[in-house]
Image (cartoon, helix red, strand yellow):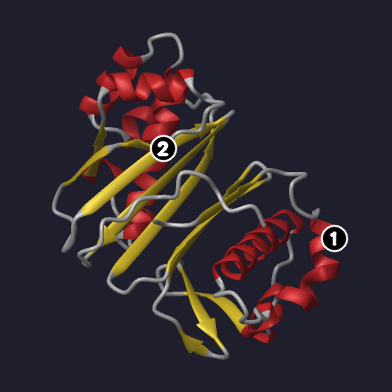
Amino acid sequence: MIPWVFLRAGEYPSGSELFSLAPSFLSPAETAYLGTLRFPRRRDDWLAGRWAAKRLLAALQPAGQPFIATEYALMRSPSGAPILHHLGRPLPYSLSLSHRAGAVFCACCPLPGVALGVDLEWVEERHPAFYQDYFTLAEQAFAAKAEPNAPAVWFTLLWSAKEAVLKSLGLGLSVDPRRIEISADPHAWQALHRQASASVWQIVTVQTRGLPVDAPLSLWAQRRGDFVLTCALNAKGPAELAPDEHPIQP
């Protein structure tokens, strides 16, 4: 199973508190990078992501083994994805994180041959041009049919799913998002809408068009209030993986 953590604003230290706590959980390399962040909002989001990731890693540490947060560093790869290092050496872990509207979502898989991508979005209305520019005609038709009176919910789910898949492929937004098409059983997606407070992972179907996919792709989504969480897995290994039913409580 894939362990993960999701924290809303107020469930972790504030930006000023995290800045004060930074020496206790940031590595020297991360501390140096923190000094380059000039915009408070960007700095607060970055700190929240590192704080959540270190809490998640601490929870995964085998019993009896001390976890020293400052020995671990999340450094950006050329694609922008975080790469986990321990004492300067990269680890074969796949770790992905996302933050939105004061909340942070992070997941980690320590198995080799796995590429993980997660995304977190706030359900909100968007300009109609956004739907035309980033969604296929089939996706637009699906969203309109699934919930005619609340398309923002479904377009947010579709968009978050695309982001997670692109992260798992190491591409980010370097390719046209319409090359990824998301679909699902309408009943499952209706369950996501009705069970926003139940927070149940639902399987989502993904198809890619001409992208470098060399391993099976799996995709899950869930609602937590006004947030949408998605988790994509690009796995070459034989293990059957899925997100844990419940998040880790740091």
Q: Position of residue 248 (x, y in %)?
A: 58, 53
Q: For this rendering, which residue is in front, 196 or 27?
A: 196
The structure residue drawn at horizontal position 53% and vertical position 76%, both measured from the top left corner, is 75
Under circle 1, the secondary element is: helix
The structure residue drawn at horizontal position 53% and vertical position 29%, both measured from the top left corner, is 123
Q: Is residue 223 left or right of residue 206?
A: right
Mark nearer the N terminus (1 vs 2): 1
Q: How many marks?
A: 2
Q: The C terminus appears in which quarter of the rendering?
A: bottom right
Q: Is residue 58 left or right of residue 185?
A: right
Q: Which mark is residue 17?
A: 1
Under circle 2, the secondary element is: loop
Q: Is residue 247 above or below residue 126?
A: below
Q: Which mark is residue 63?
A: none
Q: Position of residue 190 (x, y in %)?
A: 38, 19
Q: Position of residue 220 (x, y in %)?
A: 36, 42
The structure residue drawn at horizontal position 30% and vertical position 19%, both measured from the top left corner, is 187
Q: Is residue 182 above or below residue 91?
A: above
Q: In the orientation shown, which residue stands out farthest toward the bottom?
A: 88
Q: Quadrant of residue 170?
A: bottom left
Q: Quadrant of residue 47?
A: bottom right
Q: On the image, numbered disc 2 is attached to which residue?
A: 201
- The answer to whether the residue labelled 1 contacts the one labelled 2, judged by CB atoms less than 8 Å apart, is no
Q: Is residue 82 above or below residue 211?
A: below
Give the class, few, some or many, for how many residues have Cα within 10 Å of label 2's Cα (few <14, many ≥20): many
Q: Amino acid at mark 1?
A: Glu
Q: For this rendering, which residue is in front, 234 or 62?
A: 62
